[in-house]
Amino acid sequence: MRERGSTRLNPAQLLKAIAFAADQHSRQRRKDAAASPYINHPIAVATVLASEGEVSDEAILLAAALHDTVEDTQTTFEELEEHFGLEVAGLVRELTDDKSLEKGERKRLQIEHARESSIRAKQLKIADKICNIRDITVSPPANWSLERRSDYLGWSEKVVAGCRHVNTKLDQEFDQAIKRARETLSLNP
Ligand code: NDP
Ligand code: ZN
């Protein structure tokens, strides 16, 4: 889906962003029991956007690959701007929590900020939640109780409520991911 104002994808730029993120996250692992390589997640988010959301806008796909670099590594917005430009750095900023705040407040702010986000950031936020919900379904963080997984689903729905109606396919994939998660975990909606 190419929208007005979207940037044409240069595959070399996307590969550069993936390589940059892989390098920054190289010593990190996801929270699942198998401790999957961290980079699997940013690649999954970019893949959901391209394959399921039919997004071909370069800025969105690069930002997907880079979306957790500032939050979870030493990467700065200035570095992202230098290597990938102002638009990509700005999008990553929209996806980055303020880590100086306590967890509950950060989660509350994600719900609040979703509605005010740009159209591009809304798609990124939905794709991020789709990937995390799929992970919660099949490879959740080790030791998470059913209650905690259920809480995460409910919170994600509140964030995504503020991101809907910009990409129908992503809205549908999110709804399916939630439904499947609840069925698999035998949770009531
Ligand atoms: P976290 O924010 O600590 O963990 C979830 C995040 O971890 C995801 O958003 C994702 O973020 C990342 N992640 C890494 N690996 C996985 C994976 N395999 N599956 C899914 N996500 C993964 O947890 P919560 O969202 O629960 O937030 C913490 C809050 O929960 C605090 O407010 C705390 O007080 C509360 N809490 C609740 C409990 C409960 O039982 N309900 C128990 C303890 C705490 P990303 O995409 O950014 O990497
Ligand atoms: Zn993420």
Image (spheres, rainbow, N blue to C red):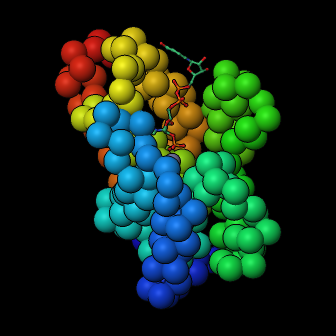
**Picture coordinates of residue 128 (x, y %)?**
47, 48
- Residue at image position (38%, 46%) is 131
In the image, residue 131 sits, relative to residue 32, either above or below, namely below
**Picture coordinates of residue 60 (x, y %)?**
55, 67
Answer with left or right where residue 39 lies relative to residue 36.
right
Residue nearer the viewer, 27 or 186: 27
Total number of numbered discs in the rendering:
0
- Residue at image position (36%, 14%) is 145
Q: Quadrant of the C terminus?
A: top left
Q: Is residue 6 visible?
A: yes
Q: Is residue 133 visible?
A: no
- Residue at image position (38%, 67%) is 50
In the image, residue 78 sits, relative to residue 132, either above or below, namely below
Answer with left or right where residue 153 lies relative to residue 155.
left
**Picture coordinates of residue 24 (x, y %)?**
57, 63
Residue nearer the viewer, 57 or 30: 30
**Picture coordinates of residue 118 (x, y %)?**
67, 56
In the image, residue 146 sits, relative to residue 41, either above or below, namely above
Q: Quadrant of the N terminus?
A: bottom left
Name the residue at the front extreme.
27
